[in-house]
Image: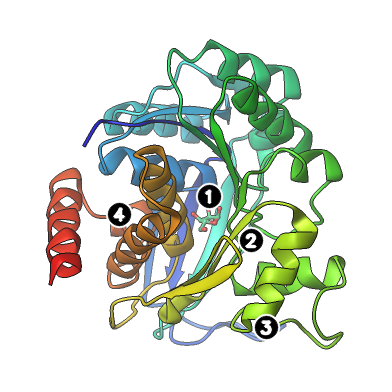
Amino acid sequence: MASPAIAVVGSTMTDLVTYVQRAPEAGETVVGDRFVVGYGGKGANQAVMARRLGASVAFVGCLGDDSYGDRYLAHLADEGVDVTAVHRVPCPSGVAPIWVEPDGTNRIIVVPGANDALTPSRAQQAVQQLSDVQVVVGQLEVPQAATAAGLAAARQRGAITVLNPAPYASVSAELLAQADWMVPNEVEFTELAREHQVGPADGADPRDEAQVRALAEVLGCGLVVTLGADGAAVLVGSQVHRVQAPAVRAVDTTGAGDGFVGAFVVGLAQGLDPLAAARLGCACASWSVERDGTQTSYPSAQQATELRTRLAAELET
Ligand code: RIB
């Protein structure tokens, strides 16, 4: 399959991960099991997942002028991500303190730092200057105006645009208008539905096909909802299809959703239909939750190739 070209307009965070039996209550101190520093940020996670699946990936974002920034830039380059459009700015790089409990669930605080310095003109120029691009993906950890400008530039050159509305925030009309696809998780789906008055007032349900259809209609774009262990709901035409996730034992769910998005955009860029792209997304996300860490939990390039071969064989049987 041809190597697709992806651009990510997004964030980097240094993940400061504590594994703990139980997160503390307010005013309480608990003893953690382990502490690990890793590479994260929803944008960079998606970029790395896409790269490991063999895509050419350009990253558009900002790092600070500190040692976290130095290390992160070197890391992206080591992964083979094009960092020409990564700007260094005079402030701290983004960090994310994370707590992970034994069932794999996490609690995350992001402190965006340099990520907030991405401007619409930087994002627009970076996307315009790419030699090739089929899909541009954004999230909500950099200013929405910058993401909107990057996605608008992508559309002008005929690329597909994908927005992962995470972490949830009200999406500006300007940004929404530039998204061909929206990929929320369950929480983000419910928040989007509440904001756009879709479904019951006490909380919309992404497992309800009519509500998925209704939200997509209001948003005016394609919709894929990630459902954790239950896979994903994918709107194709007027039908909602369910993609099952492989059964796995979760140890750390951090970055699994980003793994899904990174793989989904590779599938779209390679011309797969959205259901097949979502299957690839679920396979990569399931791989990730069985392993510790964020990008460290993603398949390596060789493992990603093996995973795709296995997926293709399963689909043939
Ligand atoms: O989605 C997981 C990511 O969220 C982490 O890597 C953390 O940095 C935050 O961006």
SS for tag 4?
helix
Q: CA distance from mark 2 to mark 4?
A: 19 Å
Give the residue displayed 68% in from the left and 48% down from the top: 140
Tell me the quadrant of the picture where the N terminus can be found.
top left
Q: Residues within 10 Å of mark 4 (few under 14, many from 20)?
A: some
Mark closer to the chain start, 2 or 3: 2
Q: At numbered mark 2, what does the secondary structure look like: helix, strand or loop?
A: loop
Q: Secondary structure at mark 3?
A: loop
Label 2 vs label 1: CA separation? Answer: 12 Å
Q: Place residue 149 in its image quadrant.
A: top right
x, y percentage for residue 5?
39, 28
Q: Residue furthest front?
A: 238
Which residue is under mark 4?
A: 296
255 lies left or right of 94: left
Q: Which mark is residue 42?
A: 1
Does the Cβ of the disc 2 residue fall within 8 Å of ligand 1?
no
Q: Earlier in the sequence, mark 2 or mark 1?
A: 1
* First reached walking from the N terminus: tag 3 or tag 1: 1
| CB under 8 Å between discs 2 and 3 | no
Q: Amino acid at mark 3?
A: Asp
Type of amino acid under label 1: Lys
Queried on whether the Cβ of the residue with tag 3 lies below 8 angstroms from ligand 1, the answer reads no
